[in-house]
């Protein structure tokens, strides 16, 4: 009674309450309710408005025809309804809840969506395509087969085993429609379903849509270019330039605007809308049109259409409600994003990935052997000493009549001809010219009295400049290639040492006098020939020798007798003679798996996203986490075989021994593979085209590879680069791998477990950034 009194005393409040009650009652019977929808694309400095205050009401069990030209916002509105796009302002309610709400099946099983593009996996058969969506919607095999049989017959499709790539464009669109109808959803969204369809089949499709809307209370929203075809719908909405011009029953719109076809109604509304937007005509044309329209409607005693230019009797009240608690809406949106992955969706995505792999067995075998080929090429081509290096020789002893018995020939015989190949010349000028022309890497010169000078130096201890000069081999080298020149010097110096031992032994002198005054023992880790150890030894030996020369000179003693008193003891780890290959191979194993995983993940997601496949799966209820988990599980087996083959080849064939636990090394490589997959996902979130993916992926290979200490020690970098190298996804992981392979370390050591932690941290970081970018692109 008091409410009635308050209503009478305050008629405005009473009318508002009446409208609110009417709004609530109408909303309960609406399958889709859109109120005051605004949607912008882009950023604030460059944005485009796709929806402008759109209001749309679709009662349950109705067929709703959404009409409008291309680019008017129809597809954007459909994507907002299924939860793929978030409105900048306004509210969307589907089947009583907001799309994407926890426990809501939109997106999910409750909605069937057919996009403009076919959005089908071209290598799948019709049956495999239907089974994929059936598994996504948690349908059992019996129901899937039953629906498949009906849809093949109803839509006049060919054999269930026929591949989609072998179908015509019209047949592919019918398969797309079959996927939308498969699970018999409560809500059907069909974007141009009858384009390119035979007129008889089009009539058959419409009859089926009318049937399911009446018998199963299925709500259907359909867009079409055939305006008159929309007369079969229960309600139609007419859109232009992102605005809803009007929505109502087709017969009422024809009566209201006194037209004979919906096309004429649409033209009339477009002219009204255009006049309204022109400032110079707003005071004349619009007023006359509105007056004439109102008179026409009033004379016929017909109520106005439910929506005119985006407004309903209760839309203003509803929009006020939407703005009341924006903080609560933001919290609810964040809460709804935390959705636990569903096993049947992961299974469906796994079956899809496995089917795609099954369709390309050749590429699968290629994937298995890519790491094997790459590690084999690395072991064969990198870290080995150069062989058969061509070098010119000018031996004055042989030219000056010493054909036998001279010591220079004995020395040359001790040089390994497999490493350095000498070509004799009769004069020094010709030999030097050959080097300058690029035919040889250097010239070795023996003086005419080399043999006698060697005896005088070693036996009689003569150290005058002439003797020292004549008893030396003079090398003129092309130093543009560090590795080749280093090998030549090393081979000749080692051979010279052996030669000197033989000379001393022949003259009854202890050959130990020919040993260099430095003893390099077994390395603590690795081998003494590795780059960092070599640099340290070289610096220490050179500095010590210079120091001793200064001391001897100060005491009037010949500095040529200086012996550096440095002894490098037995290595704690590694062995003498270890090659550069043993240093670089562990890092290359990590890098190969990491970069292969990037390409596989990034490219697959971009292709699916570009063709609409990924979005269609998302509308079917799949989350990014579920797709990624399925992808990682399937790729796990591929990576497992890749890692095993790569380790077998490196260990057995190329003698890159893993001194530590093999399982631990495999686990670290696999974890870094997952990190590569997550980085690929981040690239796919950033890029729209395959070309962009290739540029970003290939462009990041060398910066990561070169700055991570994979090929060259980080100690050789400038200080700032050495600091920055700590922030790459490979640096600490490669170091951990080297510790496992060369030092036999386990997780009890800091560098090993820290490598695992860093790999996991980068993986989580890439996943998080990818999720943020995917959300922003939504």
Image (cartoon, helix red, strand yellow):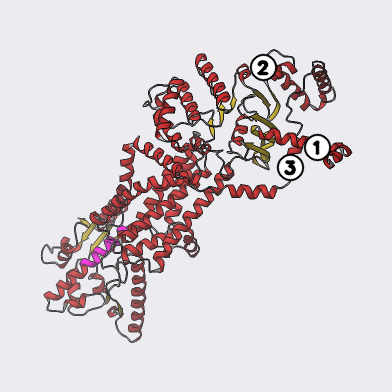
Which numbered disc covers residue 321?
A: 3
Nearer the viewer's eye, disc 3 or disc 2? 3
The answer to which of 84 and 586 lies nearer the viewer is 84
Q: Which span of residues is magenta-colored? A: 478-495
CA neighbours of label 2 inside 10 A, class few (<14), some (14 to 19), many (20+): some
- With respect to residue 711, does 9 lie above or below? above
Residue located beneath label 1 in the image: 16
| Outermost bottom residue | 555
In terms of secondary structure, where does tag 2 sit?
helix
Identify the residue at image location x=43%, y=57%: 730
- List x then y, in percent, for residue 87: 65, 39
CA neighbours of label 1 inside 10 A, class few (<14), some (14 to 19), many (20+): some
Q: Marks 2 and 1: in contact by CB < 8 Å?
A: no
- List x then y, in percent, for residue 243: 70, 30
Residue located beneath label 2 in the image: 263
Residue 737 is drawn in which quadrant?
A: bottom left
């Amino acid at each position: 009674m008091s409410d009635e009194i308050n209503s009478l005393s305050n008629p405005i409040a009473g009318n508002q309450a009446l409208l609110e009650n009417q709004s609530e009652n109408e909303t309960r019977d609406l399958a889709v309710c859109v109120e005051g929808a605004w949607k912008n694309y882009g950023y604030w400095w460059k944005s485009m408005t796709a929806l402008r205050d759109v209001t749309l009401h679709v009662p349950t069990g109705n067929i709703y025809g959404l009409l409008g030209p291309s680019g008017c916002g129809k597809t954007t509105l459909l994507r907002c309804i299924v939860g793929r796009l978030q409105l900048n302002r306004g509210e969307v309610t589907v089947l009583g809840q907001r799309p994407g709400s926890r426990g809501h099946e939109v997106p999910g099983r409750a909605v069937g969506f057919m996009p403009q593009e076919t959005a089908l996996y071209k290598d799948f058969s019709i049956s495999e395509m239907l089974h994929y969506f059936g598994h996504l919607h948690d349908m059992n095999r019996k129901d899937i087969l039953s629906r498949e049989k009906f849809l093949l017959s109803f839509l006049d499709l060919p054999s269930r085993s026929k591949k989609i790539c072998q179908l015509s464009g019209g047949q592919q669109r019918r398969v797309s429609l079959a996927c939308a109808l498969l699970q018999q959803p409560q809500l059907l969204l069909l974007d141009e379903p009858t384009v390119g369809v035979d007129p008889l089949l089009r009539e058959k499709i419409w009859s089926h849509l009318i049937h399911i809307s009446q018998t199963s209370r299925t709500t259907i929203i359909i867009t079409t270019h055939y305006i008159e075809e929309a007369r079969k719908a229960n309600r139609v909405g007419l859109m232009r330039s992102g605005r809803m011009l009007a929505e109502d029953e087709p017969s009422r719109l024809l009566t209201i605007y006194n037209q004979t076809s919906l096309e004429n109604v649409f033209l009339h509304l477009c002219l009204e809308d255009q006049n309204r937007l022109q400032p110079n005509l707003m005071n004349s044309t619009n007023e006359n049109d509105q007056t004439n329209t109102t008179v026409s409607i009033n004379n016929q005693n017909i109520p106005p259409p439910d929506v005119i230019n985006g407004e309903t009797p209760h839309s203003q009240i509803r929009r006020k409600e939407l703005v009341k608690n924006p903080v609560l809406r933001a919290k609810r949106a964040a809460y709804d994003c935390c959705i636990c992955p569903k096993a049947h969706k992961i299974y469906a995505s796994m079956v899809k990935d496995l089917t795609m792999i099954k369709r390309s067995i050749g590429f699968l075998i290629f994937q298995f052997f890519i790491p094997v080929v790459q590690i084999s090429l690395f072991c064969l081509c990198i870290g080995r000493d150069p062989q058969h290096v061509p070098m010119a020789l000018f031996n004055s002893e042989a030219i000056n009549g010493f054909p036998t018995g001279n010591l220079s020939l004995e020395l040359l015989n001790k040089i390994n001809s497999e490493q350095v190949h000498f070509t004799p010349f009769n004069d020094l000028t010709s030999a030097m010219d050959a080097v300058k022309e690029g035919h040889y890497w250097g010239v070795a010169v023996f003086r005419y009295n080399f043999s006698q000078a060697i005896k005088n130096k070693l036996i009689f201890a003569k150290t005058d400049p002439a003797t020292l000069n004549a008893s030396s081999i003079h090398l003129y080298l092309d130093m543009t290639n560090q590795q080749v020149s280093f090998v030549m010097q090393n081979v000749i110096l080692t051979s010279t040492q052996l030669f000197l031992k033989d000379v001393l032994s022949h003259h009854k002198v202890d050959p130990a006098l020919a040993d260099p005054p430095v003893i390099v023992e077994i390395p603590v880790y690795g081998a003494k020939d590795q780059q960092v150890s070599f640099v340290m030894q070289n610096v220490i030996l050179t500095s010590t020798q210079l120091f001793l020369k200064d001391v001897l000179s100060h005491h009037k003693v010949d500095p040529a007798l200086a012996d550096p008193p440095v002894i490098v003891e037995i290595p704690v780890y590694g062995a003498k003679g270890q090659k550069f290959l043993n240093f670089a191979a562990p890092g290359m194993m990590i890098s190969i798996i990491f970069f292969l995983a990037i390409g596989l993940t990034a490219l697959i997601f971009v292709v699916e996203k570009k063709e609409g496949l990924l979005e269609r799966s998302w509308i079917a209820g799949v989350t990014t986490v579920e797709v990624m988990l399925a992808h990682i599980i399937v790729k796990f087996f591929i990576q497992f075989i890749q890692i095993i083959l790569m380790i077998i080849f490196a260990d057995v064939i190329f003698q890159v021994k893993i001194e530590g636990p093999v399982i631990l090394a495999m686990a670290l490589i696999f974890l870094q593979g997952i990190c590569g997959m997550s980085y690929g996902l981040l690239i796919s979130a950033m890029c729209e085209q395959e070309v962009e993916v290739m540029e970003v992926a290939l462009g990041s290979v060398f910066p990561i590879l070169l700055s991570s200490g994979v090929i060259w020690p980080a100690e050789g970098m400038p200080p700032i680069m050495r600091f920055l190298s700590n922030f790459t996804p490979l640096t600490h992981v490669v170091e951990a791998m080297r510790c496992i392979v060369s030092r036999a370390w386990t997780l009890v050591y800091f560098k090993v477990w820290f490598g695992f932690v860093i790999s996991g941290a980068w993986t989580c970081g890439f996943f998080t950034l990818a999720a943020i970018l995917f959300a922003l692109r939504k």
